[in-house]
Amino acid sequence: MGKLVYSVLASLDGYVADADGAFDWAVPDAEVHAFVNDLERGAGTYLYGRRMYETMAVWEDMPLDGQSEVMAEYAGIWRAADKVVYSSQLQEVSSARTRIERVFDPDAVRAMKERSDRDLTVGGPGLAAAAIRAGLVDEYQLLLVPVLVGGGTRALPDGVRVDLELTDVRHFGNGTVFLRHRLVR
């Protein structure tokens, strides 16, 4: 059975994008990106909201000539995974191995987890909030970037209590800190 993992790059004050919607401050350096590749390698399916999918879909057709090894490796990891996009608006997808679901159905996600021999990831704070509220997220992987942005799109939802156990910590040369927590059942 696969786990549902929420992996996110966030500012130290807990935002994935600032008040203007920018997240350029979160672009990982080569060391952090290589670590993210290692995290993502075990994922068989990405669950995305529409906006996160549209952000990530650049990896489908990104020319790999001239890209760093770590970027090319991530493109391969991303392209090899299945993707499920939850959107009532999106009419078609621009990547292979991708399907659209019109509504987020927690029971369907539970069934996907039960059938999967690989982990699933949830991407995008809105969709992640729905999965967290439904009690579906088994593991939280936060990469905290050393910047305060003062507001914007929160990485974690308000109004939800989830008991967690810290299972891993890693520090990077650029000041980013990785925290892995698992759900305490």
Image: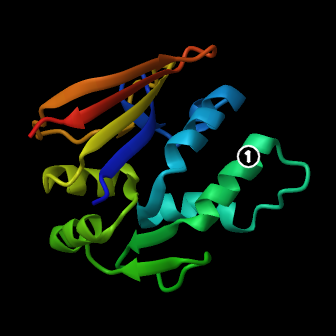
- Which element is circle 1 on? helix
Seen at 13% across and 37% down, the residue is: 162
From this viewpoint, is residue 139 visible? yes
Q: Quadrant of the N terminus?
A: bottom left
Left or right: residue 79 compared with residue 12:
right
Q: Position of residue 91 (x, y in %)?
A: 48, 86
Image position of 138 with respect to 165: above or below: below
Q: Say above or below: 107 vs 120.
A: below
Image quarter where the C terminus lies is top left
| Amino acid at dot 1 | Met
Residue plotted at (14% across, 56% down): 134
Residue 111, horizontal then vertical, whole percent: 22, 72
Q: How many marks?
A: 1
Instruction: Give the image quarter of residue 127.
Output: bottom left
Q: Residue furthest right?
A: 66
At 83% from the left edge and 61% from the top edge, which residue is drawn? 63
Q: Quadrant of residue 56?
A: bottom right
- Mark 1 — residue? 71
Residue 89's place in the image compared with 77, above or below, is below
Mark 1: few, some, or many residues within 10 Å (few <14, many ≥20)? Answer: some
Can residue 18 be seen from the camera position used here? no
